Amino acid sequence: MTTSTQEIENFDSKAYLDMELLRFSTAGSVDDGKSTLIGRLLYDSKSIFQDQMDAIEAASQKRGEEYVNLALLTDGLRAEREQGITIDVAYRYFSTPKRKFIIADTPGHIQYTRNMVTGASTANLAIILVDARKGIIEQTYRHSYIASLLQIPHIIVCINKMDLVDWDEKTFNKIVADYKAFASKLDIKDVHFLPISALAGDNVVHRSENMNWYNGPTLMYLLETIHIGSDLNHIDARFPVQYVVRPMKNEYHDFRGYAGRIAGGVFRVGDKVRALPSGFTSKIKSIVTMDGDLQEAFAPQSVTITLEDEIDISRGDMLVRENNVPTIEQEFDVMLCWMNEKKMVPRGKYILRHTSRECKCIVKETKYKLNINTLQRIEDDVEIGLNDIGRVSIRTTVPLFFDSYRKNRITGSIILVDEATNETVAAGMIV
């Protein structure tokens, strides 16, 4: 793909910025074809440049491969290219005339579970790949459970390598039936199934001529049209304050605004709001953005809100509707995914970050650890180490304003940070 001067001149930057953004992650076992699928998606949608294509063609020839290895587009680390696997989360950005996309290519190995959680935590959609020859395996269960735990609204199960099972419809139908039986135990709302060949490009961007029995959409069509507008919570108004704006200029002499990103609900000029933790109420005077004032704003817009009354509000506070207040507690349970090689310390002290608020906390107790492969609780061994997921009870030094993760992924998530090293050691979903 090459970009001409005429195309650059015709580029409408405002229209591009206003396009809807879909974040999606890929997951699957080793060698299921995740990186190849993304490479095929980028190549067939003409979203890579000619010099990138030349580079991976040269790399493929150097490695003695018979075909252009599109997986090299996302496998950026030297160790990944040498082993032919994904280790770190690789992010790719591309767009079509209908949508913008951010792809998180996550690793398939068990020891990189933390990387999958990182890549999928902000995703609207997860693509789970299944090798048509192997069917549903342990890693499929593992990745589907994590997608369910992270409350990813949409799942696309791509049964890949259909070319290696002679495009057999019965093989596809059996895998679909097996997955549905397992998924019935999970909290997965919207699942789609696609028979594809990432290597050959069948049903990725272009419809396959080898599977006439399949009448559903291609992967690209699904990505462009799947409805994500209602994925965010537009009922419970939540506005964590990140920064207090005081311009200190003569023309804005008395301006005091509260800047942040709306985490849920809709805010309108004239609405009565309550500031937490003080509990004082006021009305919204204006909603300010770089492009001018708005009459209303909703998640996930970043705006500056001004109020009619002078209230003491600072970073870490939250604006909510007067009669729709989140849970305010110092003690709560979270499903914690441990991301550090140093194990969790029982009764250990950590820094907790939640929306724009930061405080110290103590891990009171571990209630159970989860065997992700069998979905069974482990209560006799509650030592939590790297890549483990468990339910723990946390107590903070100050009250937090939160919703359950199921209700709001933004106000229901936390991270724990090691006080000594400042490393992020865990990500948690409030139960």
Image (cartoon, rainbow, N blue to C red):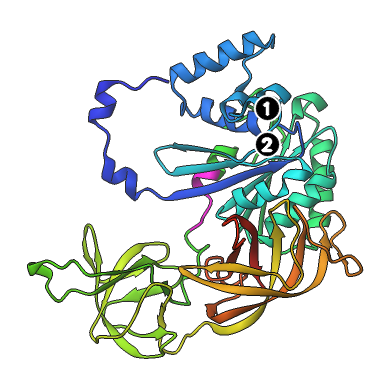
Crowding at mark 1 (Cα within 10 Å: few <14, some 14-19, many 20+): few
Instruction: Please give the label number shown on residue 114.
Output: none
Asked if residue 226 lies in the magenta stretch, the reply is: yes
| For the residues bearing labels 1 and 2, Cβ distance under 8 angstroms | yes
| Disc 1 target residue | 79
Q: Which residues, given as a range, are shown in magenta?
A: 223-228
Judging from the image, what secondary structure is the residue with disc 1 in? Answer: helix
Task: Where is residue 85? Give x, y as percent.
Answer: 71, 30
Q: Is residue 170 above or below residue 156?
A: above
Task: Where is residue 244? Give x, y as percent.
Answer: 30, 71
Quadrant in which residue 161 is drawn: top right
Q: Is residue 127 above or below residue 359?
A: above
Residue kind at label 1, given as amino acid type: Ala
Residue kind at label 2, given as amino acid type: Ile
Q: As rendered, which of 140 and 365 lies closer to the eye?
A: 365
Judging from the image, what secondary structure is the residue with disc 2 in? Answer: loop
Question: Which residue is depicted at the point 59% across and 55% down?
Answer: 421
| Disc 2 target residue | 87
Q: As rendered, which of 50 and 179 lies closer to the eye?
A: 50
